[in-house]
């Protein structure tokens, strides 16, 4: 926690990462108001988010919170998101991502709860790998010890194309989610990268159908393809602003 030697490591690591992380834009034209990806300036929701909403009847995550953008595949942030789950994995990448997540939770998890209108999360879930279904996702192995909540295990439906870019209503299944102490169940759903949101929103749909009253999705990074036709304004703006870990997509400090 803040003030401890471990927290000093967290703050030092995140301070170093601000040299290459990209802030997530929230109130700019050309930004999807669901996933914060690039859209045409006349749109408020990207095609994939609009499609997911239509196919699910709106039974999706109540809020999506990317911690940073991953722009392209050559920057340090992209390297860390590959290297932490490579074989062998990079201890340095794991440490940086763990520190980034820890710092976000301490500074901004209250923002997420406030947006949902809740006091506590009751459960945590991690989006399983669709390509290595028999292995615990490295992100779950890395971050679950930091999240003292009951784990909701999501089981993969192997009949779905693991490379699908579309929401699938039966991609995952899980046991019924029970309320705890009469509080509505609220699940913190965690993933490393949002590309199209297909896996994440399929998991959120599963959690809602299993009984979750609220689902908040936190992703370490929202992938941005600089070659996408509408991405140039977003990329130019995001890369021109220094990353500030005291700001999240749900909260900005009041002006002094």
Image (cartoon, grey):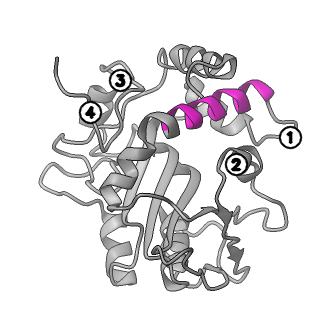
Instruction: Tell me which numbered mark, 1 or 4, is placed earlier along the sequence.
Output: 1
Residue name at image x 68 percent, y 22 percent: 6
Residue under circle 1?
87
Q: Secondary structure at mark 2?
A: helix
Q: Position of residue 234 (x, y in %)?
A: 28, 36
Disc 2 versus disc 3: nearer the observer? 2
In the image, is 215 to the left or to the right of 102?
left
Residue under circle 3?
239
Q: Secondary structure at mark 1?
A: loop
From where the camera sits, is residue 178 visible?
A: yes
Q: Which residues are magenta?
A: 91-104
Instruction: Tell me which numbered mark, 4 or 2, is placed earlier along the sequence.
Output: 2
Few, some or many residues within 10 Å of mark 2 (<14, 14–19, 20+): many
Residue name at image x 30 percent, y 47 percent: 38
Please tell me which residue lies in front, 49 or 96.
96
Q: Quadrant of the N terminus?
A: top right
How far apart are labels 1 and 2 at the CA level? 14 Å
Q: Position of residue 242 (x, y in %)?
A: 35, 18
How far apart are labels 3 and 1 at the CA level? 30 Å
- Residue farthest front in this picture: 181
Few, some or many residues within 10 Å of mark 4 (<14, 14–19, 20+): few
Q: Position of residue 85 (x, y in %)?
A: 76, 42
Disc 3 versus disc 4: nearer the observer? 4
| Mark identifier at residue 252 | 4
Q: Secondary structure at mark 3?
A: loop
Q: Quadrant of residue 81?
A: top right
Instruction: Tell me which numbered mark, 1 or 2, is placed earlier along the sequence.
Output: 1
Q: Secondary structure at mark 4?
A: loop
- Residue farthest right in this picture: 88
Instruction: Tell me which numbered mark, 3 or 1, is placed earlier along the sequence.
Output: 1
């Amino acid at each position: 926690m803040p003030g401890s030697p471990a927290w000093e490591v967290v703050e030092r690591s995140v301070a170093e990462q601000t040299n290459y992380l990209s802030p997530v834009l929230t109130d700019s034209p050309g930004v999807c108001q669901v996933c914060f990806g690039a859209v045409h300036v006349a749109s408020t929701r990207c095609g994939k988010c609009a499609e997911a909403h239509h196919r699910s009847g709106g039974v999706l995550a109540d809020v999506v919170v990317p911690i940073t953008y991953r722009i392209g595949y050559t920057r340090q942030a992209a390297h860390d998101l590959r290297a932490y789950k490579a074989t062998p994995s990079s201890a340095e990448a794991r440490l940086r991502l763990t520190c980034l997540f820890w710092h976000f939770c301490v500074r901004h998890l209250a923002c997420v709860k406030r947006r949902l209108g809740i006091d506590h999360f009751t459960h945590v879930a991690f989006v399983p790998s669709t390509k290595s279904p028999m292995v615990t996702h490295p992100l779950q192995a890395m971050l679950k010890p930091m999240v003292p909540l009951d784990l909701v295990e999501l089981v993969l439906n192997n009949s779905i194309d693991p490379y699908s870019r579309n929401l699938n209503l039966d991609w995952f299944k899980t046991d019924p989610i029970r309320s705890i102490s009469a509080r509505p169940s609220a699940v913190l759903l965690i993933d490393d990268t949002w590309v199209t949101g297909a896996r994440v929103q399929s998991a959120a749909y599963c959690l809602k159908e299993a009984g979750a009253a609220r689902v908040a999705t936190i992703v370490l990074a929202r992938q941005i393809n600089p070659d996408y036709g509408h991405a140039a304004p977003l990329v130019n703006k995001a890369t021109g602003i220094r990353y500030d870990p005291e700001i999240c997509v749900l909260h900005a400090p009041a002006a002094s």
